[in-house]
């Protein structure tokens, strides 16, 4: 490892001065820039805070990938690029040793920093950052814009600038040459920033108005400057607030996907926001807006969304249109108010007033926990939250929570394995006994289980909602109905033939199959009585479409089926359900009542629900019965049938048969 005395180190620094922008000796463990002074080094004096290495890069904490620390630890030269003040720097870190006058050795790292452009990629990056800042400051596009970085290189000019100076489009060098020849003084040194100047092109003479502006990055550091030049004779008719650079979406002026990602990465890197959210939005069925109202209206809505979001997030926020109607926003947590966002969503919804289409905006929010995570992954997380909203027909905000990633993966796995699992016989029905007030077995409810080779027995809560959302629950339900009917058929002519089996009908089934035809077909094929196959439909499903269900229920009843209102009490409209739906049996879930802390109130409610139901001619079955006390109370209140862990948990049908149909224990459950 190279070793230098302090005077040698000073000498070397001076020699290399012309080649490198900066030469420094650092202690990477402390983030200190060493003071090249023998006495100070011997005393172990520290540099002041503002001179600490990371302060040089405009940070308040250690750099994430400290090249010098790597160089120090691995005793090898390391290199990297770093951005400061919008410029790209190259840092070469070489491990060295300083030998002090008392012969003490101080290992450290010599950093050689260049601001030289290393390759076009570096140049692009730096200039892009300048243009991002530029696009924030420029207000009009009908002027010719010529932009220079702080190294006096022309980095951008718009079409109008090429036209004004009659330079070939895209030839920045030529334009720069014409322009520099023409422009009077360098206004960099003056305070003058608006003036008029003549332009002669052959015999042609035009008067131009010139505006000069410096460009600063988000932290107020000077990064370059631009001129806005207008032909004085032309009116500023088209004074728009639009932006023009290629990181922008031309329609709305918001960042495009790439621009958004780099703007957010910058804002996080340079601490322009502290705690922040990434918000992603989607309009439900936006395609229909274009179809019904035309593309013009669609575009108007997108522009309005962009404006509304910009107002919402303020100066420190960033708005991007990722694609079509998908927007993404970075907003400081401190200035974010959910009710303001909801108000924005309402304002956007109100842009369409039509019986044909209701404009709903769904929003997913990810709170940035790991600032080093790629911005695309942050957006993915906000989208993951957004995807949970799928079926909601109104404005809705969902937050990304820990575990959502796992849930999303699980959902993907369920959907990708479903077909194969159904084919392989991995689904089974379990039966849970239903008994009367004398504890006599009357029948059972069929509850499905997925016996997965990888995961073992999976409860329906793990896959039914997923299959419902995906619109394929009807396939599993049909399998359950077939299996239950096959069992009933098998029991015919035996001691078990009086038992019924209740099956569940999902709210989504009616959307995909003709329930009536399906059940008629099933009982006919299996040759069983419809009265033995009871059909459970949840209160919530029934109330979602009263007319459809009432019609269906009537036809099924006429064919001999019995309909049970499942999960009664779980919805918000229980009394209305009793009024509007003419079912045969009311099924109350103890669970819903138990969740109330007031057991006295629960009993009073149970009492009136049971007597009301009976007055309407509907027998009551209570499920979720877990204790003897519950059973006693329910019996006293007049419940006719019971189902619950107190009697038995759901079990495979073979076990059910073995348990209840042995000679010894006939139909008696207890
Ligand atoms: P559900 O229709 O209300 O079924 C009753 C649930 O309560 C069952 O859960 C059952 O195991 C559970 N349970 C029974 N007794 C007790 C008790 O004493 N205490 C407690 N805490 N729970 C009890 P399971 O089997 O996990 O089913 C959950 C839900 O999944 C069902 O609620 C139903 O909505 C749905 N489901 C189950 N099988 C099917 C099916 O084949 N098709 C459709 N569409 N949905 C099904
Ligand atoms: Ca049920
Ligand atoms: Ca239930």
Image (cartoon, rainbow, N blue to C red):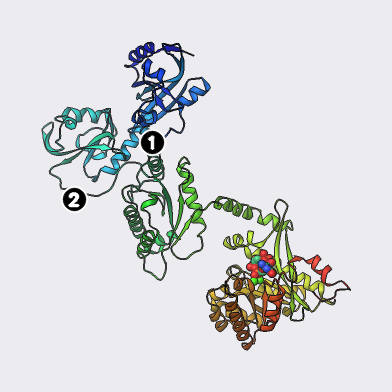
Q: Work out whether 405 lies above or below 245.
A: below
Q: CA distance from mark 1 to mark 2?
A: 46 Å
**Which mark, residue 237?**
2
Q: Quadrant of residue 514?
A: bottom right
Q: Is residue 32 left or right of residue 212?
A: right
Inspect this view and state whether residue 346 appears: yes
**Can you give x and y, in whole percent of width and height, for residue 206 in the image?**
12, 37
Q: Work out whether 316 lies above or below 503.
A: above
Q: Quadrant of residue 479?
A: bottom right
**Can you give x and y, in whole percent of width and height, for residue 139 in the image?**
24, 46
Q: Quadrant of the C terminus?
A: bottom right
Query: Residue beneath label 1, please?
Result: 60
Q: Is residue 546 left or right of residue 640?
A: left
Q: Work out whether 207 lies above or below 401.
A: above
**Can you give x and y, in whole percent of width and height, for residue 466 in the image?**
60, 59
Q: Residue at x 21, y 42 (%)?
A: 143
């Amino acid at each position: 490892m190279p070793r230098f005395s302090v005077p040698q180190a000073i000498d070397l620094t001076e020699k290399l001065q012309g080649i490198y922008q900066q030469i420094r000796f650092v202690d990477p463990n402390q983030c200190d820039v060493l003071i090249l002074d023998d006495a100070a080094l011997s005393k172990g004096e520290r540099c002041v805070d503002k001179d600490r290495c990371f302060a040089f890069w405009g940070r308040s904490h250690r750099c994430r990938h400290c090249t010098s620390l790597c160089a120090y630890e691995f005793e090898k030269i390391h290199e990297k690029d770093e951005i400061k003040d919008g410029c790209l720097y190259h840092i070469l870190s070489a491990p060295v040793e300083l030998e002090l006058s008392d012969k003490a050795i101080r290992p450290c790292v010599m950093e050689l920093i260049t601001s030289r452009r290393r390759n076009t990629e570096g140049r692009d990056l730096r200039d892009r950052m300048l243009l991002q800042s530029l696009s924030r400051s420029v207000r009009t596009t009908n002027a010719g814009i010529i932009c220079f970085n702080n190294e006096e290189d022309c980095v951008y000019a718009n079409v109008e600038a090429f036209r004004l100076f009659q330079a070939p489009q895209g030839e920045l060098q030529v334009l720069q040459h014409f322009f520099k020849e023409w422009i009077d003084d360098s206004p960099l040194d003056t305070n003058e920033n608006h003036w008029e100047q003549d332009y002669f092109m052959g015999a042609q003479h035009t008067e131009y108005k010139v505006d000069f502006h410096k460009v600063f990055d988000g932290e107020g550091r000077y990064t370059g400057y631009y001129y806005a030049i207008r032909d004085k004779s032309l009116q500023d008719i088209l004074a728009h607030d639009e932006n023009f650079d290629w990181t922008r979406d031309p329609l709305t002026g918001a960042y495009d996907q790439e621009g958004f990602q780099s703007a957010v990465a910058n804002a996080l890197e340079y601490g322009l926001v502290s705690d922040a959210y990434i918000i992603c939005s989607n309009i439900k069925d936006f395609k229909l807006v274009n179809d019904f109202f035309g593309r013009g209206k669609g575009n108007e809505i997108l522009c309005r969304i962009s404006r509304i979001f910009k107002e919402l997030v303020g100066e420190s926020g960033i708005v991007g249109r990722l694609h079509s109607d998908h927007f993404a926003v970075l907003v400081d947590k401190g200035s974010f108010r959910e009710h303001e966002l909801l108000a924005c969503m309402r304002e956007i919804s109100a842009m369409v007033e039509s019986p044909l289409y209701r404009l709903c905006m769904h929003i997913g929010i990810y709170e940035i926990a790991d600032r080093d995570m790629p911005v695309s992954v942050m957006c993915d997380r906000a989208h993951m939250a957004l995807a949970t909203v799928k079926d909601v027909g109104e404005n809705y905000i969902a937050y990304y929570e820990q575990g959502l990633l796992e849930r999303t993966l699980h959902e993907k796995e369920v959907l990708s394995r479903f077909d194969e699992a159904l084919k392989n016989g991995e689904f089974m029905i379990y039966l849970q006994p239903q008994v009367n007030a004398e504890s006599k077995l009357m029948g059972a409810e069929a509850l499905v289980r997925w016996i997965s080779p990888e995961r073992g027995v999976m409860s329906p809560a793990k896959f039914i909602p997923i299959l419902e959302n995906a619109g394929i629950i009807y396939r599993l339900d049909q399998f359950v109905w077939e299996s239950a009917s096959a069992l009933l058929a098998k029991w015919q002519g035996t001691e078990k033939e009086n038992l019924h089996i209740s099956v569940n009908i999902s709210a989504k089934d009616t959307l995909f199959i003709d329930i009536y035809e399906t059940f008629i077909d099933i009982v006919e094929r299996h040759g069983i009585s419809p009265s033995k196959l009871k059909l459970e439909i949840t209160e919530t499903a029934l109330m979602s479409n009263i007319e459809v269900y009432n019609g269906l229920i009537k036809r099924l009843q006429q064919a001999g089926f019995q309909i049970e209102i499942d999960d009664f009490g779980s919805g918000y409209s229980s009394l209305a359900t009793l009024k509007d739906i003419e079912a045969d049996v009311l099924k109350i879930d103890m669970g819903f009542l138990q969740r109330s802390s007031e057991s006295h109130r629960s009993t009073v409610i149970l009492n009136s629900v049971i007597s009301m139901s009976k007055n309407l001619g509907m027998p009551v079955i209570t499920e979720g019965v877990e204790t003897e006390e519950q059973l006693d109370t329910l019996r006293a209140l007049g419940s006719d049938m019971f189902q619950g862990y107190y009697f038995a948990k759901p079990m495979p049908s073979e076990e059910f048969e073995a348990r209840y149909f042995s000679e010894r224990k006939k139909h008696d459950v207890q």
